[in-house]
Image (tube, grey):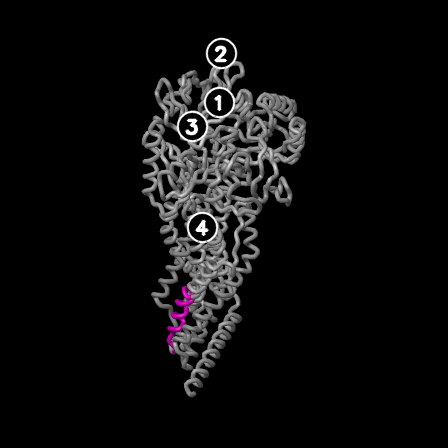
Amino acid sequence: MPTLQKLFVKNKNSKEMLKNHIFIAFRNFKKKKAFTLINVLGLTVGMTVCLLILAYAKYELSYDRYHSNAPDIYRVSVDLYSGDVLNTRDAQCYPAVGQMAVDNFPEIEAYAMARHYGRMLLKRDEIAFNEDRLYFANQSWLEVFDAPAIYGDLNSALDGPDKIVLTESAAKKYFGDSNPVGEKLGVVPGGGQVVMQVTAVIKDVPKNSHLTYDVLISWESGVKHLGWEYAEWNANNEFMYLLANQDIDNSFQHKLNATYFELTEKFEDRGDSLAVQALTDIHLYSDKSFEAEVNGDVTIVNILLIVAAFVLLVAWVNYINLSTAKSLERAKEVGVRKVLGTTRGTLVFQFLMESFIINLLALVLTFTCLQGVLPLFNSFSSLDLEINLFNDEQLLWQVALFYIIGSLASGLYPAFVLSNYKPLTVLRGKLRDSKRGSILRRGLVVFQFLITMVLLVGTLTIYLQVNHMREQKLGFDKEQLVVLRAPLLPESDEVIATKFNSLRAELNSLPQVKSVAFSETMIGRGTIDLNSTTGISSIENNAGGDLNFYMYRVDSAYLSTLGIEILAGRNFSHNMDAPAFADDSNLISGIILNETGRELLGFNSNEEAVNKPIKLWGKERRVVGVIDDYNHNSLKLKVDPLFMMFDKHLTATNFISVKIAEGTEDYREVLSSIEDKFSSLYKESDFEYYFLDEAFDQQYKADQQFGTIFTTFSIITIFVAILGLFGLVLYEVQQRIKEIGIRKVLGASVSSIIGLFSISFLKLIGIAIILSIPIAFLSMQEWLSAYAYRIELNVALFAIPAIVLVLIALSTIVIQALRVAQANPVEALRDE
C-alpha cells in the first residue's frame, strides 16, 4: 500500500511539473512575442516547403506502382547502333519479341504490347471525336496491367478482331451514363470506316502512369484491317512489356539478346539490340525516343529534395541562433533558479519543452498553410498532389520523425548552453560568450549562406538556360502560324486529296492568309509522330546503312510556309517529283535531307549531295535538296538526321499550317474566317487549332515550372537565412553593448561602429561564397549536361548572386548595428 501511495504521489508530482514547464514556456513566449513569432514563422516556412517537396517527390516516385504486378513488369525497347556507337535509344520494340521471350524463357509468364497508331476518328451516329490517346493492344494487356472493369468481361475483351475497350471518360462521351457493352462504334483507321463492338468499360488510367489512354482496340484488328503481323521483326512500333514470375537481373538482358541475335541472324546489318527496363523506372530514368509521354527527371526530384533538406536545416539553424541570441536575457532567470535549487537536468528539460512546443506550433501552422498553398501548387504544376496526415501512414511517420528530430536538433544546443551558466557569474553581470559557442554559431551562419549562395546560382542558371532555349535560332519561323488538325474521314484517298486542295484554295483566298501547307507531322510534337528508319545509305560513298534517320512527308508549300531555308538544290515540285513510296520512270523519286543527314551520308558539302543517288529501303532515290538544320523538337535535344518525302496527293496529312500575313491585328476575325472555310468542307469534323509559337514553348513548360519552384524555394531559404543572421547580429550586439558604449564615450562615430560589425559578418559571408563556388559549379554543370544547347558557366553567374547576397546581408547587419550605434551610451554602462 505505501508503495502504491508513493507511485501515485510521484505520478501526480510529474504531472504538476509538466504543467509547470508548459506554463513557464508560454509565459516566456508571451514575454518575447517577436522572438517567438520569428521562430515559429521560420520553422513553419521550412516545414511547409519540405512537405510540399516531399509530396511532389512521392508523386513522381509513385508512377506505375499502382499495378499489382508492378515489381514484376519490364519494358523491352530497342537500342540502335552505328557500328559500335550507340545512335538512338528507342522506347518501342518489335512485335515478335514478346512471343520470343515467352517461348524461350520460363521466367517470363506473359507479354503485353500496345501500338499508338496516331489520331483516329471514332463515330456513334452523329457523335464523333478525334481520339489521340488510342492504342491497339493484345488481350494480355488487360491481364498484365491493372484495369478495373466497370462493365464487361476483361478476360475476352481484346481477344479477337473488331473489339474495343473504352475508359469511363471515353464511354461517357459516346454513350452517356448507360452501359455501352455490345454497342457499335465506327472507327476510321484510314481509307474507310470499320465497325467495332464495345466489349468493356474500365476505370480511367491514373495520371501517375507513363502511358495513358482513353481507348484500346484489339491488336487483332490491326492484323485484320492494317496487315500487321505478330512475327514482325523489322518495324519497331510496339510498347512491349514482359511479366516475370521471378526476380530477373541484368543477366536476363544478355540472355534475351543472345536469343534475339540467333533468331534474326538472317537479317543483315541490323545494328540493334534489346534493352530491358523495370516498369517503375520508366518515368524518372528513361528519356528514349518515341516515349509514350513526356517523362519526369530523377535529377530534378533529387535537386528539390536537397532544397527541401536545405530549407529545413536553415530553419533549424535559425532557431538555434535566435535562441542563443536571446540567452543573455534569460541568464539571470537561470541563475536565480539554480540558486533556488533547480537542477541542470530540470533546466534542460524546460528549454527542450520550449523547443518541442515551438516546433509543434509551427507544425500546426504548417498544415493550416498547406490547405491554401497546396491547391495553388497543384494548379501551377498541373498535378494532383494530396497531403492527408491521417490517411497516409508513411507521411504520419515522416512528420513525427521531422518533429522529434527538429525539436531535439534545434533545442538541445540552446538548452545545454543556457543550463550551463554559473549563477554567480550571471548575477554579477560578468557573463561572456565562450569561444567554442562563438565558433559554432559562426559556422552555422557560414553553412546557411553557403546553401543560400548555391541556390541563388542555381536560380540564375536555370533562368538563363530556359531563356537561352526560348531565344535560340531554331532554323524555322514559328511566329504567326496557326496549325489545324486535319480531319479524319471514312473516304477514299482521291476524295480526301480533292477536299484538301479545295481547302487550300479557300484559305489562300483570305486576304490575311499568306500560305497554306500540309504535313504528316508538325514541329514541336516530339518524336512520337515521326517515322524512324535505318534503311538509308549513299550509293557513291557507301555511308549510312545502319544509321537512324527520322522521316516525314510534306507538300511543296511546307518549307516556305515554315520558313525552313533550302541551302542547296530545290524544293519538291509537282511536275518533277513522284509521290513518296511510288515509282514513276518519268518523275524523280526524291528526298530532301537536313545538313546533319547530309554529313552522315558522307557528302562533303550541301552542293555535292544534290542529285546524288541514295539507297532507301532497297530502292534508289535521289537527293533533290538540302535544308538547314532546324530544331524539330526542344533545344534540350540535338538535331537528328532527318529527311522529307513528297506527299504529292496529301494522303499522309495530319496537320495543316496556315501562315498569317504580317500586320494582321484581329486574330479572332482571321480564325473565324478559317473556321468558316474549314466547316463548310468538313461539316462532321471538329475545328481544332493551335498557335505554333505557343505550342513549341510548351516543351519548356516543365523547365519553366522547375525554375519557378526552385526560385520560390530559394527566396524562402534566403528569408529564413536572413532571420538567422538577424539572430546572430542581435546576439553579438548584446554581447558587445558595453564595448560599444565605451567606444562612443571615447568618440567613435556611428559609421565606425557599423563598420566594426559589418566587417566581421562580411568575412563569414565571404567564406560561405568561396566554399559555395565549387559546389554550385559542379551541380549546375551536371544539370546543364542534360541540354544539347546550353549556356556556358561564367564569372557573372557567380558574381551576381554573391553581390545580391552581400547587399541583403549588409542591409540586415546595418539595421541592427545602427540601432545600437545611435543608442545612449549611459544605458549600456549604468551597471559598471
Which quarter of the figure has residue 550?
Answer: top left
Q: CA distance from mark 4 to mark 2?
A: 62 Å
Kindly report which numbered mark, 4 or 3, lies closer to the viewer in this rendering.
3
Q: Which mark is residue 304?
A: 4
Residue 648 in the image: state x and y as whole percent.
53, 20
Q: Is residue 270 above or below residue 310?
A: above
Q: Residue 653 at x, y = what percent?
A: 55, 26
The amino acid at mark 2 is Asn
Where residue 545 sits, quadrant-wise, is top left
Residue in front for this viewpoint, 577 or 441: 577
Q: Earlier in the sequence, mark 3 or mark 2?
A: 3
Q: CA distance from mark 3 to mark 1?
A: 13 Å
Q: Are marks 4 and 3 in contact (CB under 8 Å)?
A: no
Which element type, helix, strand or loop, lies under badge 3?
Answer: strand
Q: Quadrant of the N terminus?
A: bottom left
- Front one among 503 and 703: 503
Foreground: disc 1 or disc 2: 2
Position of 203 with respect to 429 (left or right) is: right
